[in-house]
Amino acid sequence: MKIKDLCADERPREKMLARGAGSLSDGELLAVLLRSGSREESALDLARRLLALAGGSLGALFNLPLDKLLSLSGMGPCKAGSVLAAFELGRRFLQEASSVVKTPLVTARQVYNRMIPQLKGLRHEECWILFLNEHNYLLDKMMMSSGGGNSTVIDVRQIIRRALDKGAASLILVHNHPTGNPTPSQADIRQTDGLRKGVGAVGMSLLDHVVVADDSFFSFAEDRMYQA
């Protein structure tokens, strides 16, 4: 039976779009990757034969060499390539997920040590945001603005959008003072207060604002200056 002859709710692609990829069986997911079958069989039939070739095991299918995939009738280079690419993306996803640094950022010195490679020696100001999860593990970091020699302006709404996209629970603001003096200015204090109120309104928290100079830093949370 051709896939087009199935009810719309039973077609793998339509089922996935309506109910999510998790609702599909292994064979149905493979059929979505294969996209089409042949005159003799549907993509779903071909996917089932492909699984059977691997003994029904995704692990075994992952390790099938290209020539073994191509030995299956109906599997051309394009279909085999799609399967190999999907497995490689899955492998990279697992590597990426496990590469999150499992050291919580809880002190201003940790923040300074992490950010000084980006900020040391700059002759202009840059503002960075560190996005943290609920355990204070770093999810990502991003430069939000770059300014002149003694000032830069942050966009609170843009920061909040980025934080929500990343699923962050809290943030740390970091920026540098090219003058070498990390003492916060009145503009720094105002922007810190504005960001704290903005992220607080959407259920997140601003844990700290660390002002970095090459050999010293100031922490708003700890309210003091440190030598590097």
Image (cartoon, helix red, strand yellow):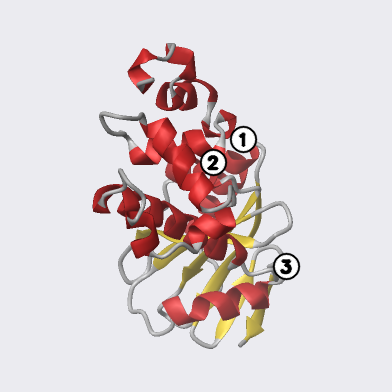
- Circles 1 and 2: CB atoms closer than 8 Å: yes
User: What crowding class fits label 2: few (fewer than 14 Cα within 10 Å), some (14-19), or many (20 or more)?
Assistant: some
Q: Which image quadrant: the C terminus? A: bottom right
- Identify which residue is drawn at 33% across, 52% down: 80
> Relative to residue 91, is residue 42 drawn left or right?
left
Residue nearer the viewer, 51 or 137 = 51
The amino acid sitting under disc 1 is Val
The residue pinned by badge 1 equals 202
Question: Secondary structure under badge 3?
Answer: loop
Please, is residue 60 above or below residue 52 in the view? below
Earlier in the chain: of badge 3 and badge 2, it is 3
Between marks 3 and 2, how big is the CA–CA gap?
21 Å
- At horizontal 34% and vertical 63% (from top left) the residue drawn is 67
Q: Residue at x 27, y 33 (%)?
A: 38
> Which of 76 and 28 lies nearest the eye of the viewer?
76
Residue 134 in picture, x, y percent from top left: 71, 51
Dot 3 or dot 1: first in sequence order is 3
User: Who comes first in sequence, dot 1 or dot 2?
Assistant: 2
Please name the residue that numbered disc 3 is placed on: 106
Residue at mark 1 to residue at mark 2: CA–CA distance: 9 Å
- SS at mark 2 in the image: helix
Q: Residues within 10 Å of mark 3 (few under 14, many from 20)?
A: few
Amino acid type, callout 2: Leu
Q: CA distance from mark 3 to mark 1?
A: 22 Å
Quadrant for the N terminus in the image: top left
**Percent from the top left, x then y, of residue 17?**
45, 25
**Residue 164: mark in rendering:** 2
Residue 174 location (% of width, % of height): 52, 65
